[in-house]
Image: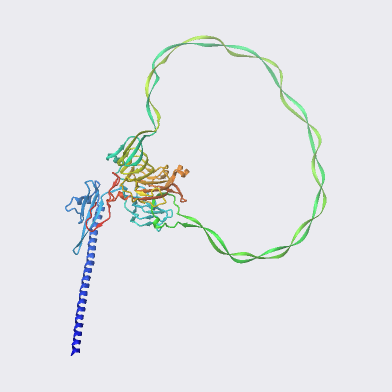
Amino acid sequence: MKDERKRGNEEGFTLIILLVVMVTIGGLVTAHLGEVRSDQRKIMTRIYASRAQERAFGELERAQNIVNASPYVNDENTALKAAVLSNPAYIPGTEVEVEKVGGPSSEWYTLKATGEFMGITRKAQIFVRQRSPVSAYNFFVVDHPLGISGAPRGAIHSNKTIDFYFPWGTFRDQVTASEGFDYKAGATPANTRLWGQHDAHAPTQNIMDGISVTDLKSKPTTLKVVDNLLAEIRFLGKDTQVKLFQPAMRTQVQKTGTRWVFDKMVSETHTRQVPVYRTEFYNVTEKVYKDVQQTWIEKKKVYKDVQQNYQVTKDIFTDVTETYTVQEPIYQKKWVTVQQIEKVWVENPPPSLKDIEGGFSVGGQQAATGHWENITKDTQILQDVLVGHKPVTKTRIKKVKTGTQVITKTRTIQVFDHYVDVPRSKWIKVETGTKVVQKSRQVLDHYNQVSETKQVPSYRKESYTYMDWVNVSEKLVQTKVVPTKGVLYFEKKIRKIEGKVQGQVSVASNDRVRITNSIQYVDKNNNTRMSNGLDPLKRYQFNPNYRGKSVLGIMSRGDITYARSIPKKIEINASLISTDGKVSMEGISVNADGTQVGISSDAAAHPELYVKDSIRRLGGIVSRKRPVATYVDSSNNVGCGFKEGVSIMDRNMILKNGGNISPPYVFQMNRPTWTLTNTGPTISPN
């Protein structure tokens, strides 16, 4: 009875434990199922949100395409303008909302799109500048081909062809041409790396049409010089020094002088003595001669031939056979290893990715980039090898002298024989007497006095003024110091521009511009925008200590040139824009259609003046004609320009969040500029 009670208690305890375990397992299962459902809900939420975001992106992309394809009227994008005037402000044909950012003159807009899927809504927005400054390119060439090499950063375009020079060019950003890509000096499609968007047959963009440097005269200018004066500009940070020179010239000036002028005709009587001559006869005695023949006898020697005998002594030789022994070499055919030197053309290897930066405009003759190497090769050849010698007996005929003999010979000589008489004659003149001859001559007899009256002009003296050409030496007219801001406009040539820029300024010349030294952006603490601008051995990169927002636009109707007097190493921070010319090193020439590049005779004769070490450039180049910073000859030698170059597009010229600090009144092109797309909640443009 007691054992049964004990067994019952144990069974009850076991049952309780079993129930507790089952309840625990059920709870765990329920909790796990809850977590699974929760994770599933999160996964589905992310999937739905992703699809909603994709719808927002798709709607935004459709709106971008509409804006890109819309025409411009009065420099305004018609799609953007129609949107802001609509209610609601949607891009036509979409539900993308448009909001203008900034004041009435602002070029910036925000596009906002909403996507919904399974009750989840996501938003996307993008900033767009309805027009783009022409300085938004690293290179833009309107009428000529463009030759480039290396690894320039920033968008590149030519309305003609783009010529890629040298292997392993690396282009991370957009590269477009309207008439195709060409490969020169060892470059090929296989060894040219186009990592960004590229198009060899893009539409032409005539951004120079309708713009003129003289348009800047009507803009708010810090300085406007319309006189015939040459300018020299030095940036001094927040201030800019401008020297104006009257050029040396040849000009006309007014002078005063005196001269005799005709007054009237007057009668004048003159008396003069006129000589009168008579004929006079006189006698002279002259000698009389006659011709007489003179004869004489002359003796002449006569010679005769005589035979003469003479004797000579002659050596007598006898042929004798001689026997001799020689050591004759023994050869055997064997395979022999020999070393041969061969010249092999070796293409230069591609640079490592960490070393790829920079690049510049280049032109010249075509040559492959590489070098010749001497390679030693072991070659097996079948060759006769000396293995020994053997004696060989030979005979030869030798002449030996055995005596002499006397030989009698005969020769003919001439000897005197006798004289003969030879008659000779000649004609001579012999005086035979004299005779008297009568002659005549004119001699002065007397003078007659004659009076004459005639009309002669009478003159008087008067003063007068006249214009005369004189040479005027160059002279400094004025030195101005103006703020580094706004527009500095010059009607004539800017022959010198250099210095450190702290501000936002555009410099324009209706003639041409000559860069004579480095131009660098600095902040108020004199920190440069870029590091290592004058040290080509170090990486050209943005300076983290720079705190400024300086930009410079140099705009010229004619050429912008780097002067031959620039230092060996320079840095240029500026957007260089030539509406009718090119941007190039002094001494480099380009033919009418831009297909041929050459150098001047002075540059060829004086490479020490025209060949520089390096140029590092921050900003874009826009020109009508082909820009060329370096000329390379057929041997890959730099004949004019820079041995090394780095060019980086200044993103401050195009980015909204960069401060919208393109140079004042820089020329615009009717083409939208888009920034990165923002996702999620609406983000303020500021």
Which residue is at a point 34% across and 56% down the rendered structure image? 196
Task: Pinpoint residue 283: horizontal percent, then vertical percent.
Answer: 64, 13
Specify how the rendered protein is coloured.
rainbow
Q: Does residue 67 appear left or right of residue 591 in this picture?
A: left
In which image quadrant can residue 453 be found? top left
Q: Is residue 397 visible?
A: yes
Looking at the rendering, in which quadrant would you find the N terminus? Answer: bottom left
Where does the image place residue 346, in percent across and percent down from the top left? Answer: 47, 57
Residue 295, image x, y percentages: 75, 26
Name the side, left or right, on which 267 lies relative to 112: right
Q: Which of 22/231 is in front?
A: 22
Residue occupying the point 72% across, 27% down: 426
| 339 lies left or right of 633 | right
- Percent from the top left, x then y, of residue 21? 21, 78
Q: Along the line of sight, which residue is nearer the eye, 655 or 270?
A: 655
Residue reaching furthest to the left: 87
> Would you say residue 140 is visible in this rendering?
no
Tell me if residue 398 comes above or below residue 40 in the rendering: above
- Vertical arrangement, residue 259 with respect to residue 65, above or below: above
